[in-house]
Amino acid sequence: MKLKELLSGIPVLSATADMETEITNVSYNSRETRPGDLFVAMTGFATDGHKFIGKAREAGAAAVLCEQTPEDGIPYVRVENSRRALAVIGANFFGHPAADMVMTAVTGTNGKTTTTYLLKAVLEQAKGTKVGLIGTNQNMIGDQVLPTERTTPESFEVQKLFAEMRSAGCTHVVMEVSSHALYLDRVYGVHYEVGIFTNLTQDHLDFHRTMEAYCDAKAILFRNCGVGVYNADDPWAERLMQGATCRKFSYARAADADLRAENIDLSSDHVAFDAVTKDERVKIRVGIPGGFMVYNTLDVLGAAMQLGVPLSESASILAKVPHVRGRVEVVPTPGKDYTILIDYAHSPDGLSNVLSSVKEFSRGRTVAVFGCGGDRDKTKRPKMGKIASDIADFAVVTSDNPRTEVPGDIIQDILAGMEDAKIPYVVMEDRVEAIHWAMDHAESGDVIVLCGKGHETYQVVGTVKHHMDEREIVADWLRQ
């Protein structure tokens, strides 16, 4: 593709590159740059891509797109914002695939993954079509599973995924969109038919610094969609939606809303409620436990309605949808009179939600096995410690993904919130040993909740991912 075609729609401040230059590919990592590439230099938070322009040239880059004029004479195109330019370049390079599909995005602290999986199932069965999914657990093209490294990939990879989905026959895409992705323009230029807001609670303050900034990052979605389906019970909803340019559709349990849940029934293996609009009342049953699932179901119902799926049809589909991996997932424990659940709860609100839900149906103790991630927001650690001590009946404090921090230091931060704990707890730094200990000391009717890892099958120690699948850990220990 010619450079001038790649740059279509991008204001150019200055350039020395020949606009007729044939570009074979686009790269933004100099280690992955190949001859004929356009290298995009972006200013990052860990490093500045402009420092690697020389290496990109050595690797054979045909030209560089940048915000600062290069010093070594390489042909360049200078723009105001390289990140936004990369997003537009990706859409140009792959032929604007998002424009050929119905796009839905989900943002919020918790519930994004469950929402996307349930909505994907509803759309596939109701419309008889193939749906693409981009998310935390994995990316999917119909039933084909693709691995993923982060919730929302960089913009060029996002456009590549869209192109693959279009080529495979997808008519709809449902994707998680993180606050990082919105703030860093990874989905810049993508218009969504429906945007969904689940909730906003403390997380990622290592990046956003304040809850207001975190909220404002998520609000970007609702200036780039046709209709915003939002949780009217969330205290941040008013701020989030005040600058929205889309049509608004609200859902709630308590607040006055376009779609409400009434007559809620929570059980150990399902949630049930009446979904009520001004025109109809439909009984809903979903085979995933937890009070938070009421919201995760309401947003799916609301989004499906905006996409042309009647409430009653969504209800019949959701009644048959299986569990989502790593979200209140039951781990088999044959022959044992206790239950083990795996959940991705890694924020204060997520931990509170899952433990409170388990307390509603547990016949015995609610046992929390949890830690906190390293190199992430430290202020949530004592809060999670206090939540565990306030809600659980017993806690095992352990490691999550310590990354480059000392695991014992992370645990001390957690314990600061448990100084006045009225429940017994133990500290066991090794997560495998912690799981073994919880199983060995389980009592009849207990529910052991392994919090934080969810779908992850690894533990990050230092900068290395080590295999760790909690399902395997449980199964191996039971065999022994």
Image (tube, rainbow, N blue to C red):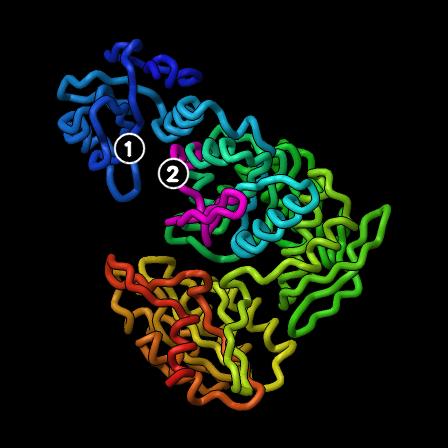
Q: Magenta segment: does it hold 138?
A: yes
Give coordinates of residue 314: x percent, y percent. Answer: 72, 50
Most foreground residue, 349 or 18: 18
Q: Are marks 2 and 1 in contact (CB under 8 Å)?
A: yes
Give coordinates of residue 320: x percent, y percent. Answer: 68, 59
Give coordinates of residue 343: x percent, y percent. Answer: 50, 66
Report the residue marked by disc 1.
28
Mark 1 Cα within 10 Å, few/some/many (few <14, many 20+)? Answer: many
Please provide the residue range marked out in magenta.
Answer: 133-159
Mark 1 residue type:
Tyr
Most foreground residue, 281 or 35: 35
Report the residue marked by disc 2.
154
In the rendered view, tell whether residue 360 sits above or below residue 229. below
Q: Earlier in the sequence, mark 2 or mark 1?
A: 1
Give coordinates of residue 268: x percent, y percent. Answer: 65, 74
Q: In the structure shown, which secondary structural element does the residue marked by tag 1 occupy?
A: loop
Most foreground residue, 271 or 468: 468
Q: Magenta segment: does it hold 145?
A: yes
Left or right: residue 470 compared with residue 273: left
**Residue at image coords 86%, 46%:** 279
